[in-house]
Amino acid sequence: MIPVLEIFGPTIQGEGMVIGQKTMFVRTAGCDYRCSWCDSAFTWDGSAKDEIKQMTAEEIWEELFRLGKDCFSHVTISGGNPALLASIGGLVELLQSRGIRSAVETQGSKWQDWLAQIDDVTLSPKPPSSGMETDFDVLDQVVANLLEKGHSGVSLKVVIFDERDFEYARGIHRRYPGIPFYLQPGNADLVEANTEELRTKLLETFEWLINLAMAAPDLNDVKVLPQLHALVWGNKRGV
Ligand SMILES: C[S@@+](CC[C@H](N)C(=O)[O-])C[C@H]1O[C@@H](n2cnc3c(N)ncnc32)[C@H](O)[C@@H]1O
Ligand SMILES: Nc1nc2[nH]cc(C(=O)O)c2c(=O)[nH]1
Ligand code: SF4
Ligand SMILES: [Mg+2]
């Protein structure tokens, strides 16, 4: 069984290595982290506990198909931390058997063998502003496991709120130089209901982050991307 909090789409992947990709989302419940600025805190803070459904891979597939019909070929698994769940292996296999490509979003704090079967793996270690501490022994192992299996779709994405986060991100890129590296500005205003107002703030932090990255000689290969879905739909859930 997989604890699922929401299934939605089709929408576009708003972040990182496959930004713009038409995709469905499966969002699992539960996280081993408690990031101070988590935009999906409802997956772990108890506020949506009545919405959690224990689902089999087949039930998840049925819901994906009901929502997406023949209008999708890609599914993104996010959370919470999906890598807490060994049971996702069955879903990954089922998607593969239907010819659907898959992606996962995880902070890289846990390994599961099914991660190696996912087409697009985004590892998003957390900078100091999150209040979390990276266990680099685990992250090294997760990266090594993926590379050892010859995975070609791994990327690193660090969310940046301040200059300390930026220094942390540089350290991540230095530690894993061969892995495509993405910087993402943090959304500090998770309660703003006015999307116009939010856009202005998000674009300002995006520009701030671009300027920092452009002046860093060790980040000449970095990609700086906003959360596209936040620019389009603001803080709305399920998009
Ligand atoms: C909600 S998390 C779920 C997956 C996994 N727990 C993780 O953090 O990678 C999905 C992505 O959203 C990012 N994120 C969460 N809160 C954010 C915020 N306030 N601003 C920008 N990105 C945020 C995370 O860093 C992560 O890359
Ligand atoms: N459109 C869209 N793109 C996303 N990329 C990562 C997301 C996430 O919450 O993991 C997300 C999300 O929630 N929506
Ligand atoms: S690791 Fe991801 S889901 Fe967990 S608290 Fe941090 S941002 Fe939220
Ligand atoms: Mg999100």
Image (spheres, rainbow, N blue to C red):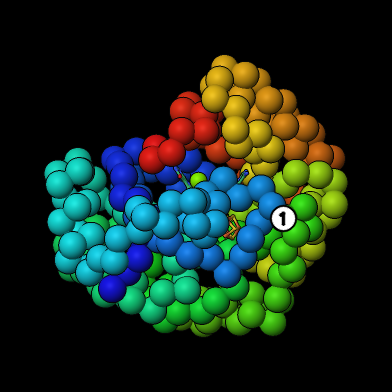
Q: Residue at x 75, y 59 (%)?
A: 131
- Image quadrant assignment for residue 203: top right
Q: Which residue does the image show at 23% across and 60% down from the upper left?
A: 60
Where is residue 219 drawn, in percent x and y? 76, 50
Q: Residue at x 20, y 43 (%)?
A: 68
- Cβ(mark 1) to ligand 3 < 8 Å? yes
- In the displayed image of the protein, which residue is found farthest to the top? 196
User: Residue, x 55% and y 38% (percent of image)?
Assistant: 227
Give x and y (percent) for residue 161. 75, 44
Q: As drawn, is 32 to the left or to the right of 85?
A: right
Q: Residues within 10 Å of mark 1 (few under 14, many from 20)?
A: some
Q: Nearer the viewer, residue 157 or 215?
A: 157
Q: Secondary structure at mark 1?
A: helix
Q: Quadrant of the N terminus?
A: bottom left
Taking 69 as reference, is 35 above or below it?
below
> Is residue 116 in view?
no
Q: Is residue 195 above or below residue 123?
A: above
Position of 155 relative to 86 (above/below): above
**Pointer 1: what residue?**
130
Whether residue 29 is visible, yes or no, is yes
Report the front residue among 211 and 150. 211
**For the residue marked with disc 1, what is the amino acid?**
Ser
| 87 left or right of 41 in image | left
**Quadrant of image for the C terminus:** top left
Q: Work out whether residue 100 or residue 186 is closer to the camera in this orientation and state it.
A: 186
Q: Position of residue 152 (x, y in %)?
A: 47, 66
